Amino acid sequence: MSGKQQNHRSTSSRPRSKTLILIGSLFTVSLLVILYTSSSSSRASISNPNPSDRPETSFVTSLEHFLIYKAPKLSLPVRDDTVRGESDDDVRKLDEMVFERENRWLNEDPGYPVEFPIKVYVYEMPKKFTFDLLWLFHNTYKETSNATSNGSPVHRLIEQHSIDYWLWADLISPESERRLKSVVRVHKQQDADFFYVPFFTTISFFLLEKQQCKALYREALKWVTDQPAWKRSEGRDHIFPIHHPWSFKSVRKFVKNAIWLLPDMDSTGNWYKPGQVSLEKDLILPYVPNVDICDTKCLSESAPMRTTLLFFRGRLKRNAGGKIRAKLGAELSGIKDIIISEGTAGEGGKLAAQRGMRRSLFCLCPAGDTPSSARLFDAIVSGCIPVIVSDELEFPFEGILDYKKVAVLVSSSDAIQPGWLVNHLRSLTPFQVKGLQNNLAQYSRHFLYSSPAQPLGPEDLTWRMIAGKLVNIKLHTRRSQRVVKGSRSICRCDCWRSNSTASNSLSSLLS
């Protein structure tokens, strides 16, 4: 009897032992998983201190993260692929490789020659044209005393025109981090549809001494124009971010065939010489907004507080087309439910403008020294319906976006007539105003530069617009290669009709 009991206890203890071993093993594995996960999280937080799916729209914040965490991996000594000396053979070889690629696509791909994503070759320029200038801005942007002759903070102006940073930072990011499907970076020139020149022309103009800046411009010009791809197309498929109208001015005439990324066309001739810019080859890009975006929650909360009919804060004395501001100020001052005030571009001015726009139904957007103004994009992202008084303004992405659906467009001659503008705005029905506001809420995403760049954001729309220029660029490139020099002029399109908001819709063509 005792033997059977002993045998029973021995037999029953085995399952318990196995159970304990299994539990112990599971505990050990779980502990290892927890430790590994914790370690991985720590490493991730060290390499990326702000892990979030939410895109960063602040230029200063995005730039700081880029320089500290991304630049060390990207700014290692790079291959300087400048061609020195005779390069006709390099141009011939590149042309043959491009022909083979295009001929293969022509016969195999029904979508050729316009296809997505478009392929962009980003030049690996020396650091003095790229990273060094970004660091110069980063190390000096807190210097508020640095201002232009009219009092505008220099670093704020650079932020407004920082399209060169947003496009370049997206293009050179690892593909695993990019979200755009409209463009891809290629690393062989023969594979490229376009060539991006990552030279920060606005930073160098404002933060370098005048002669130092001009010397750097000449160096950048020689660097780019020595490239086989430039010589092959005479620059027609090259993209230059020249977004501030003063930047790159001393050498522009040597790159007038290239695609310029501009804030506007400025038909007055004060900023661009005849023949330098045209809608055929160049692209209008929006300014970077000065104010914070009024998101869905903000739009809902601010709706009952929009008691001001029309709002404007800024400089009332401007040059060229901006002289309309003084006339509008005189006409609109003192009218009930309208705020017209003189303001500056400093931090206090930004907050005052932001508050005013979020409390207004309409925001007055007259021309500045050039036909465009950052105020238009401030109004859009603030949910304030723009009232555009700028007869020669060309809009960003107008081939994709319809501004009549989000803004009130009026001619200068109508706007300065006594009582006309106020009566026109008050004649709009609540249904019409609500429709403009709803469209505005949807459109704001198209004007928010961000890192990472977002689908249907301004970076994405830039490449969609540039893709539409591809066939025409190939036409002019091939034609220039075969036309006998001096026998006939190359076809150009330097003429364009003035904006439809002008009082005389039958105005003569401007060349």
Image: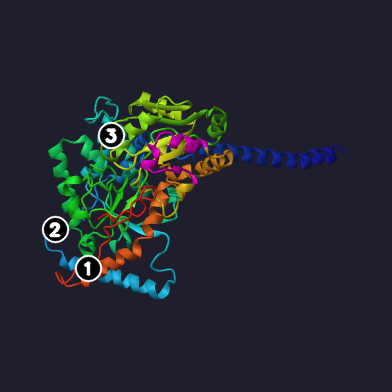
Label 1, label 2: how many angstroms apart (C-alpha)?
A: 24 Å
| Identity of the residue drawn at 42% across and 46% down | 453
What span is colored magenta in the figure? 405-426
Direction from residue 70 to residue 219 in the image, left or right: left
Determine the secondary structure under disc 1. helix
Closest to the camera, between mark 3 and mark 1, is: 3
Q: Are marks 3 and 1 in contact (CB under 8 Å)?
A: no
The mark nearer the N terminus, 1 or 2, is: 2
Q: Is residue 211 left or right of residue 152?
A: left
Hey, what amino acid is under mark 1? Ser
What residue is at 21 percent from the left and 45 percent from the top?
A: 248
Q: In this view of the protein, which residue sits in the foreground, 316 or 96?
A: 316
Quarter placement of the N terminus: top right
Q: Which mark is residue 84?
A: 2
Badge 3 element: loop
| Residue 380 falls in image quadrant | top left
| For residue 83, side relative to residue 163 (left or right) | left
Establish if 143 lies above or below 414: above
Which residue is under mark 1?
480
At label 2, the amino acid type is Arg
Q: Is residue 206 visible?
A: yes
Question: Which numbered dot is residue 50?
Answer: none
Q: Is residue 243 above or below residue 481?
A: above
